[in-house]
Every structure is written in structure tokens, then in C-alpha cells.
Amino acid sequence: MNTNYFSKTRILDGGMGQELLKRGLKPQGSLWSASALIEEKYHQLVVDTHLDFINAGADVIVTTTFTTRRNRLIQNKCEEHFEYVNTKAVELALKARDISKKNILVAGGLPNQNQTYSANLGDDLNLIEKNFYDQAKLLKSNIDFFYLDVMGSGKECEIALKTIKSFNLPVLVGVHIRKNGKLPSGENISDIVKKYKEENWLGIIAACVHPESYEIIIKELKNSDISYGFKLNAFKNIPDDYGVSSTAVWGKGGNPTKILGQREDITESKFYEFVKKFKDAGATILGGCCEIRPSHISKIASLKN
């Protein structure tokens, strides 16, 4: 694909995992959306949810693979499903695309391989590299590009980029930004671009972030020579010391909002206001993450024009 794809305004999908919960998914432990892949009875729900984001106006949908990483499956004592759930996620996303008959792209979501919203990679970087590689290898067939989902540090980006290089696919880099405008590692988003940008980069986005956190880095991103944007969430608060290291901290009933909360103020209209403001400031990659629904995406679809 053309690496200038995001030079024009494009719409990404919203929060698949939280949307599946709202539509009846009953996850086990901290498996979250991975439960919808393990249990066949939820497969049509995954397809239908992808379809609703497509029909809402998304140009890109992301595979439901945030919790199909190996360490999350190990935490939940079901590592034997690793190959199945990752290949199934691609299959269901492609099925939704085919049903829609729309010219949309499918991104292979490659999440952090240790803790969410954290720079903690653990003690074994070789294991992190292996887990990135093994998951990417399962996703690579028939996707249009990789999406590095919620990276917490430059080091994590470096390892992920190294592991996917042999697959010769473009990549959209997504890093988490805290309320102080920096990655969990303390790095600036501009540092990531300067140190690690390669020819296969499609752009960089602030991933699963509060709108207010993105607002802090607007000027910084405007000075970067690359397409940029965001996937905004509607969680109430993500503590700096939050990390899903065990099923116990995930939240009762497998829903992270039990801990992180849900903002009632991010209505479709408010979401549109944030997104339009950020687009007017130069962002071309516009999307949502946790608690952003198809109705939110539909509201911003007109911004492509």
C-alpha cells in the first residue's frame, strides 16, 4: 500500500473490546475481547461490530487482538489458544470487510507484550521480542498494515519494529500518552519519531488517550515530518501505576471500566468537537478507542470531506 495513505484525512474505528462488552460479551478473567474469539458463539458478534464501525464511516478497522498476546493468555491459563485466536481475529475482520463491499483497510493490531499503559517490559527482552514476532507472524497474512497498539516506550517500539521488519508491511505506530503529555517511559512522542522512524511508517498516533492528553502534544506533533493523529478513549482515569499484570486488577466481570471508569461527558457531539479541533490543528488520522462507539465514529465521518 501507499505509505502516504494518511496524508489525507482517514477515519479509524473505535473501541472493539468495550463495544463487544456492551453487546453482550461475557469475558473470562482478563481475556476481554479474546473471549469473543475463543468462544465460537461470539464470532458473529465480532463480525457485526466490525461492520457497524465500517458502516459508520471507518476507513480502517483493527483486528481484535489486543488481548490475544501470549502473556495475557498465559495469565488466564489458556495459552493453547494463541494461534487460533490470532488467526481467527484476522479472518473475522476480513469477513466483515468482504460483507461490507467497501474499500476499507484491515490493520493487524500488535499490542504491547507485557503490561498495558506501562513502560515495564519485564526482565527478559528476548521473550518480548519473541512474543511480538510470534503474534505478528500469525497476523501478517491478508492484513494491509501493522498497527503497534498502545506502546509504552521507545524501547518497546524499537523491539516491535525490529521483529516485524522481515514481513515487509507498512506500520502505523501507536504510543500511549499520559496526562503529563509523555509516554509512560517519560519520553516525548517526538523522540519516538526522531529515533525510530523508517520508510515503512504510515504515521504515528497517540493511542487510547484522553482528549486532554492529546491536546498537550498538538504543537509537538505539528513539528514532526509525518502523518499523525489519535485514537481517543472515554475512560475516566488511567492511574500512572496501572498495569494489567494479573486477572485480579482487571476489574469485576472482566470490564476495565470497573477500575478506570467511564466518562459520561464524551457524547457523540463532544467527541466531534474534540476531533474537529484536533483535525483543524493538523491531525489526519482520526479515531477512537475504549468506550468510543460506532455512533461516535459516524459523527466524525463527515470530517473526511
Image (tube, grey):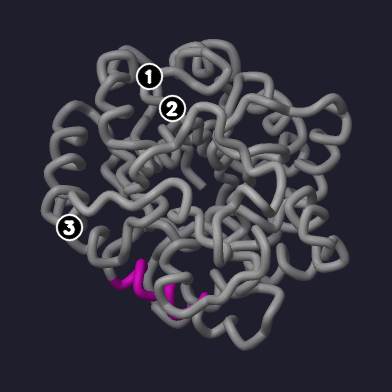
Amino acid at dot 1:
Gly
User: In the image, what residue occupies the spot 72% across and 38% down?
Assistant: 114
User: Looking at the magenta stretch, what is its main secondary structure?
Assistant: helix
Magenta highlight range: 46-55
Looking at the picture, how far across and down is residue 125, in whole percent?
83, 26
**Do the residues under discs 3 and 2 have CB atoms within 8 angstroms?**
no
Tell me how far mark 3 sits from mark 1, CA to CA: 24 Å
What number is the disc on residue 268? 3
Looking at the picture, how far across and down is residue 92, in whole percent?
58, 74
> In which quadrant of the rendered view does residue 7 lie?
top left
Q: Which residue is mark 2?
A: 177
- Can the viewer see residue 200? no
> In which quadrant of the rendered view does residue 86 lie?
bottom right
| Secondary structure type for disc 2 | loop
Q: Relative to residue 232, is residue 143 depicted above or below?
A: below
| Secondary structure type for disc 1 | loop
Q: Which residue is mark 1?
A: 181
